[in-house]
Image (spheres, grey):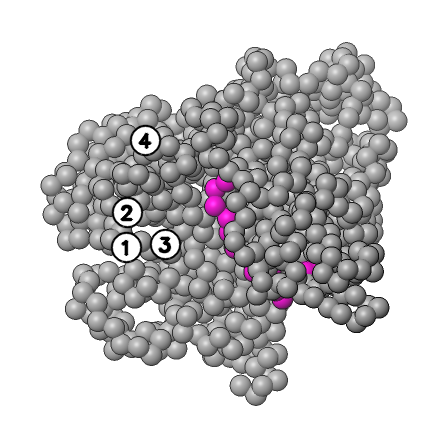
Amino acid sequence: MISLNVNGKNYRVNVSDDMPLLWVIRDYLKLTGTKYGCGIGECGACTVHIDGKAERSCSIPAKQAQGKKIITIEGLPENHPVKRAWIQEQVVQCGYCQPGIMMQVASLLSESRNPNPEKIISAMDDVICRCGTHPRIKKGIRKAVQLMRKEGK
Amino acid sequence: MTMNPTLSRRSFMKMAGLTIGVSLTPFGYSLVNASGQKEGSFKPSVWFEIAPNNKITMTMGPSEMGQGTHTALGMVIADELEADWKQVRIHQGPASAAFKNPVFDDQITVGSASVRGFYEPLRKAGAAGRVMLVKAAAQTWKVPEEECTPSKGAVIHKKTNRKLTYGQLCLKAAKLDLPKDPPLKKEEEFRYIGKPMARVDIPEKVAGKAIYGLDVKVQDMLYGTIARPPAYGAKPVSFDQKAAEGVRGVQKVVPTPQGIIVCAESLDAAWKGRDALKAQWDKGSHPDMNNDSIEKHFIEGLDKPGVVAKNVGDAKKALSEASKKIEATYFVPFVAHATMEPMNCTAHVQKDRCDVWVSTQAQILSQIFASQISGLPMDKIHIHTTFLGCGLGRRGSFPDFVVEAVGASKAVGKPVKVVWSREEDIKYDFYRAATCQRIQAGLDSQGNVIGWSHKVACSSILKFLNPEWITKEGVDFFSLWGIVDAPIPPVYSHTAYEFPNFYVEQYLSDLPIPVCPWRSVQNAPNAFVMECFMDELAYAVGKDPVAFRLPLFKNNMRARRVLETVAEKAGWGKAMSKGKGRGIAQHSCFGSYVAQVADVSVNAGNGTVKVERIVAAVDCGPAVNPDTVKAQIEGGIIEGLSASLKEEINFSNGGVQSANFNDYHIIRMSEIPEIEVHIVKSNEAIGGIGEVGVPPAAPAVANAVFNATGARIRRLPLTPQTVLAAIKSNKT
């Protein structure tokens, strides 16, 4: 039995000790916004926040996340600057990788309120988007920074 | 693009017994008032329905994979209907003959054809609804129709300052006859078409609530995975069924012709069960096949007898009389689709029905295969299309994932969701076809091309997609798009170049590596060859690449205009600093015209190419949603760059060696150039947009590398090793 705190809710699931957090979140907690892309931490589609940091849920056994605060895309508030910026800048195409990408960005912006271009590129180099939304991801980040500044967040 | 179904189209139509809103005839399409009107609403076509609560529900036939089709088609209907966008709700429709795209006579989202195929029919359908609503208002008020004005979801009678919403009018309108030829709006009357609109699917995608195939949940569902052979043609020698069945959560192990299916309570358990099988396989049909043998196979194909695909004038004679002769050989390897959502499908086969939940580009094709595997008739197969985590053509070709899920569900008697791992997705893809091509061109003393002889050795897309479309003589025109026009329907290749003596011969490879369309089909590899070679010719006769091409487009104003536009916007002709280069390429396909200029910097020491900027000009006729047009061109360029800078499937021991994103590299943020997209205002016929950004990207970059280094890149991908080798061979 594994106990997890996801999006502020406590869950207990009966799974094998080595089951990756990704599959527990998706198949047992039914939070399917977090995606499977590669299973080896290369693409970032499975990115969630664990104690505030962006982590690849495909590569972390659920057991290791016990006692920590896990936030998935569903737990990122609807009015979060990244979510609003993504809509305003029409970043998304197929959208499959975007929850992971948005979680990566949200974590980046929580560490640095106005990351420089090098920092943005280095953080976003760790994720893959096959549709080619990269120019708009950059725009989305700039917009989210603006929104945060305007609202004093 | 049907997969040679055993069930004929005609018998399907009969069995399905469907209502048709936009019906195809040999002369085009006609509008039909949908039969079986739902009580209490107005459904002027199967595509949309107006309810008394003033909501307009639109049902879309094509799949939404990020190309913005649902929004664009919704805009087209809403505009002509004169609806208020706020009252519109859009959802995905089922598999139905009523949704067949006029371009293909099939419900299939491929060939950049959704807006292209439905633009006119849906304008007419929307206009028909508007005319009927106005008539209903005029009858209600007992005033002439001419005094009634439709405006944003209501009809207004200005004289008496009265107004009725479409919701109030819909029941009365439903009883009226459908007008045969409703008048369309003039361009200046458009309310939505041509204006950037926010996509309707983005909010739920941002919220993480959009459902893709991988997210489907059905009660009592099992997860299925398949042990697949490591080499082409390999058969299982042994496997430990007991060990797999002993894994916690595994419910059933079923050997099938597709491989050994393991069904379990969770995907994790299914994968562990599959590994526990420890399946052993024989060496397969081509045990010695590897990268080198494959490249050699295609190069040797150039000297093997082929089939003549085009023969105008006498190219041989023209070449012998030319004052200058240029020859070059190019190679483009296999690349994977690698959609971010790996292949998957959920199926539930019951005694009297079969439900299939799938992210597919091909609803009817899925239905046909589900029918064959389940043994149930077509009208008992219910296809539920989810959002697609990208399609790129893989989800519009052979639906192996549907075959597997239906087969698994039939075998275990429960709903089964088959999920491919990333490794399976890359190793068992139907790849973009590899090709090796040799061109000999002859130029006269003024630098005009007088003879062109072209040999194409390539994989055959049609062999895997629909062998019936290979011509009697044996030509696969799908693999020649962008070089010659395909004389078979559906025609979506418009070759920009015509030469007085033009010979093209094709040799089709017999390798077992399966291929299928990959965003723009063979337009991209073929444009790489054509546009790089045109650049070679321009430099060979000392002409500017733009000036060299323009006279060739004297009968092709659209190609000419995008080339001129992109040259102007990119500042073509300005000198570049040392180590930097600028290249240009153009290509037309799917009814649209695109030209691109690439700026690169090359590190001649280590062969690294950095693409700094791409400027693109596109003429797609009317741009329904200009923001989507831009997004699609941006995405097409980036995917074109990814394939041309990084991607190549590696083979060893008769199978695929590449497996995941750590050895099959996709372009990443640090490699993305600045991108500028210019839409050329055009009233020409509407063209596609999803794929047309891809083809010019690779040749524009390769030509820019030449401009920077003097070295010709004739092989993709443009890795540092390839670039270094080209620079080295240029020096010797």
From the image, state whether disc 2 or disc 4 is nearer to you: 4
Total numbered circles: 4
Whether pointer 2 and pointer 4 mark residues with C-beta atoms closer than 8 Å, the reply is: no
Q: In percent of the image, x 31 and y 48: which residue is there?
A: B417
Amino acid type of the residue that numbered disc 3 sits on in the rendered structure = Val
Secondary structure of the residue carrying tag 4 is loop
- Distance, label 1 to label 4, CA atoms, is 23 Å
- Distance, label 4 to label 3, CA atoms, is 24 Å
Residue on which disc 2 sits: B415
Q: In percent of the image, x 84 and y 68: which residue is there?
A: B159
The question of residue B92 being in magenta is answered with yes
Q: Earlier in the sequence, mark 4 or mark 3?
A: 3
From the image, state whether disc 4 or disc 3 is nearer to you: 4
Residue on which disc 3 sits: B216
Q: Residue furthest right?
A: B446
Q: Earlier in the sequence, mark 2 or mark 4?
A: 4
Amino acid type of the residue that numbered disc 2 sits on in the rendered structure = Pro
- Distance, label 3 to label 2, CA atoms, is 11 Å
The question of residue A2 being in magenta is answered with no
Q: Are marks 2 and 4 on the same chain?
A: yes
Chain name for mark 3: B
- Residue B192 to residue B43: above or below: below
- Distance, label 3 to label 1, CA atoms, is 10 Å
- Residue B545 to residue B653: above or below: below
Residue on which disc 1 sits: B219
Which stretch appears magenta?
A: B82-96
Which of B728/B526 is in front?
Answer: B526
- Residue A132 to residue A8: above or below: above
Q: In percent of the image, x 17 and y 47: which residue is there?
A: B251
